[in-house]
Amino acid sequence: MKIFILSAFVASALMAGSLQSDAQKAGLKPIPASKVALTKLTSNPANPTTSSKVELGKMLYMDPRLSKSGLISCNTCHNVGLGGSDGMSSAVGHKWTSNPHGLSSPTVYNAVFYSQQFWDGRSPHLEDQAQGPIQAGPEMAAPKEYVTAVVSSIPQYVTMFQKAYGKDVKITFEKVADTIAIFERTLVTPSRYDDFLNGNKKALTTPEQKGLKTFIDKGCATCHNDIALGGTMQAFGVTGAYKYINVGDFKGDKNGMVRVPTLRNITQTAPYFHNGQIATLGEAIQEMGRIQLGVTLTNDETASIETFLKALDGRKPTITYPMFPTSNATTPKVDVN
Amino acid sequence: MKIFILSAFVASALMAGSLQSDAQKAGLKPIPASKVALTKLTSNPANPTTSSKVELGKMLYMDPRLSKSGLISCNTCHNVGLGGSDGMSSAVGHKWTSNPHGLSSPTVYNAVFYSQQFWDGRSPHLEDQAQGPIQAGPEMAAPKEYVTAVVSSIPQYVTMFQKAYGKDVKITFEKVADTIAIFERTLVTPSRYDDFLNGNKKALTTPEQKGLKTFIDKGCATCHNDIALGGTMQAFGVTGAYKYINVGDFKGDKNGMVRVPTLRNITQTAPYFHNGQIATLGEAIQEMGRIQLGVTLTNDETASIETFLKALDGRKPTITYPMFPTSNATTPKVDVN
C-alpha cells in the first residue's frame, strides 16, 4: 500500500515536471514570481513606473470627467471589478452608441503582456491605446483639448502631475494617456498556473494539469501562448468559418488577422470572441477547435481544457476607490449631446 | 503685549463657546464623535448594520449588472468618488435618457440623516429610496424580477446573502434594496465643523467661525439644520421666484415643498439646486438669500458663508473597489434596449 501511494506520488510529480517542460516548449510563460522582475517586465522604459504615477493613473482611469458627458470612464467598459471588461457583447458608449463594428471590450487585466492592442492590433502599446477610446465618438467622445482643459483646471490634478513628473510638467493629452497606461501596467493577475510554472508542482490539481496537457496537445498554445496566453496577431477561421462571422463588420487587420485575447481570468469575461457572440466557455473552446485547429473536441476534452482555464483566474491587485479632486467654475462643462 | 495676546485668545475662545451655543439653538447638530453613538444613529433598527451586510451592500451598490443594460450602477449617478453625485445638472440613465423632470442626482453621502428621500420627499428612508432608481425606466430600468434573478444566479452573491442574513434567507428585490441601504448608511463624513460642535474650539478657523455666525444670523439654518444641514421638506421660492424655475417640470411635493439638500461636501456637488442650474457656490448662496430669506447678501457676507461651507468637506470612508462575483450561463442577459 505504501509503495502504491509512493509510486502514485512519484508518477504525479514526474507528470508535473514533464508538463512544466512541455508548457515551456509550447511557448507558455509564467508571470514572474519576483516583484522586481515583474516591475521590470511591465514598466515602460521611457516612463518608469512610480507610486505617484500609478495613483494618478488610477484616478484618471476611473474619472468619468475625462469623457465629454462626464458619465463614462475607462473603467465603465474595462471595469476592474468585472474581470476588466463589461460583460456585454458589444460595448456601449457616448449617447448610448453601440460599438460600430460590433466589438466587445477586451479586458484591461494583463493587457500589458500583449504585443499589440485593440482587436485589429493597430496600436503598439497601452500608452498609445489609451488615447483611442477617450477620443472616439462612440466611446468617451472627448477631444484632446477638452481632456487637457478638464485635468488642468483641477488644482489637485495639477499638483499630482507635478508630484509624478516634476514641477515643470506640461499636462498634455498624451501625458494623461501615458499616466493611465502606467496604472494599467500594474493590472496583472498571477494565478496558481503561474505558481505551477514557477516551480510549485502542487499549485495545480491533477485534473488541472491534465487540462493543461490537453490544451497543449490539442494545439491551443499555438496562438494562446507567452505570458498572456494570447496577445499576438493570428489568422482567424483557419479551418472553418466562425459561426457568428456576420455579426458586426469587423474584418481584422489589413491581412484579416485578429489579436488573440488573453485566457487569464477568462471565466470572468463572457461573452466570448471579438464580437461577444458566444455565451459559455465550453462553446468557445469547441468553436476554437473547429475553426482554428480543425478538430472536434469531445465533451471530455472540452471539460478538461475548461478545468485548466479556470485555474487562470488570478489574484487581483487591491484597488482603493479614488476620491476624485473637485471640479470648479473653470472646469469645462459636461455635454451629454 | 502678553495681556493683549491673552485677551485676544480669551475673546476668541469666548466667541467660539458662544457660537457653539448659538449653533445648538439654531438646530444645528454634529455627527456624533463616538462610533457607538454614530452606529446607533445610522443603523436601521429593523435590519441592524453588520460588516457582512455592508460589504454585500457595497458590491450591490457598485454592480452595474443590477441595471437592465448591465452598464449603470447606483454609483454611476451617486459616485462615491465625486462627492456622492455625478456633476451633471440633470441625471442621465438607461438609453441615455435625461431625468424627465430635469432633476439632479442628490449626493448619497449623509443621506441617512435626511428625514425624507428624493427631491419631493416621497420616500421615508434609504431602504425604500433604493428601490426607485433601479426600477425607473430612465434610470437603471430593471424590473424587480430581473434584479432578483441576476443576484440569485450568482453563487457568490447567494453565499454572501446567507452569511449576512442566515442560511434560510430569501433573496428578494426588497432585500437587495435593504442591503444597498445598509451600505449607504455608512456613508457619513464627519468634518472639522463636527469637531467644533463636539467641543474642539480650534477645529474651525476664525474666518470659518465668522462664516458660521453669518450663516446662522442670516437665517440659513432655518432650513439647513440638524445633522445633515438639510433633509426636511420646505417651501421653495418664499420671497422671490427661483431664476431657473422653468427648467424641467419639477414642482415639489403636492404642497410644492422641496427636500432641502445637505450642505455637507457642498464644494464637491456642483452644479447646484434641484435642477442643477447654478454653477457656483457663491451664486447659490446669493440666490438662496434672495428667494428664501428676502435678503441681498453682500459679497463679503456671501464669501464668509462660503468660507464656512467649505469647512463642511468631510472625511470619507475608505472604499475598496469590489471584485464582483462572476455571472454565468444562468444569469439573465443584459439588454441595452
Image (cartoon, coloured by chain):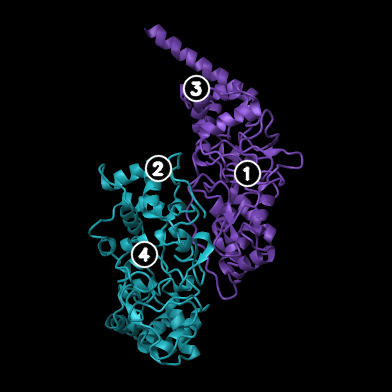
Chain colours: A cyan, B purple
Task: Give the labeled residue for mark 2.
Answer: A154
Q: What distance separates the C-alpha of mark 4 from that of mark 3?
A: 53 Å
Q: Quadrant of residue A232?
A: bottom left
Of circles 1 and 3, which is in front? Answer: 1
- The front one of B264 and B177 is B264
Q: Quadrant of residue A219?
A: bottom left
Q: Residues within 10 Å of mark 2 (few under 14, many from 20)?
A: some
Q: Compared with residue A325, is residue A21 higher up or lower down, i.e. above or below?
A: below
Precedes in sequence: disc 1 or disc 3 = 1
Q: How crowded is mark 1: few (under 14 residues within 10 Å), some or many (20 or more)?
A: few
Q: How crowded is mark 4: few (under 14 residues within 10 Å), some or many (20 or more)?
A: many
Residue B247: image tag: 1
Q: Position of residue B237 (x, y in %)?
A: 67, 33
Q: Which chain carries label 4?
A: A
> Do pointers 2 and 1 mark residues of a single chain?
no
Q: Do the residues labelled 2 and 1 touch (CB within 8 Å)?
A: no
Quick check: B33 left or right of A218? right
Q: Position of residue B59 (x, y in %)?
A: 55, 58
Of circles 4 and 2, which is in front? Answer: 2
Task: Give the labeled residue for mark 4.
Answer: A188
Q: Position of residue B84 (x, y in %)?
A: 54, 46
The extreme right residue here reads: B254
Task: Give the labeled residue for mark 3.
Answer: B300
Q: What distance separates the C-alpha of mark 4 from that of mark 2?
A: 30 Å
Task: Work out whether residue A52 can be spotted.
Answer: yes
- The front one of A147 and B180 is A147
Q: Position of residue B202 (x, y in %)?
A: 47, 24
Quick check: B328 left or right of A205? right
Q: How crowded is mark 3: few (under 14 residues within 10 Å), some or many (20 or more)?
A: few
Q: What distance separates the C-alpha of mark 2 from that of mark 3?
A: 25 Å
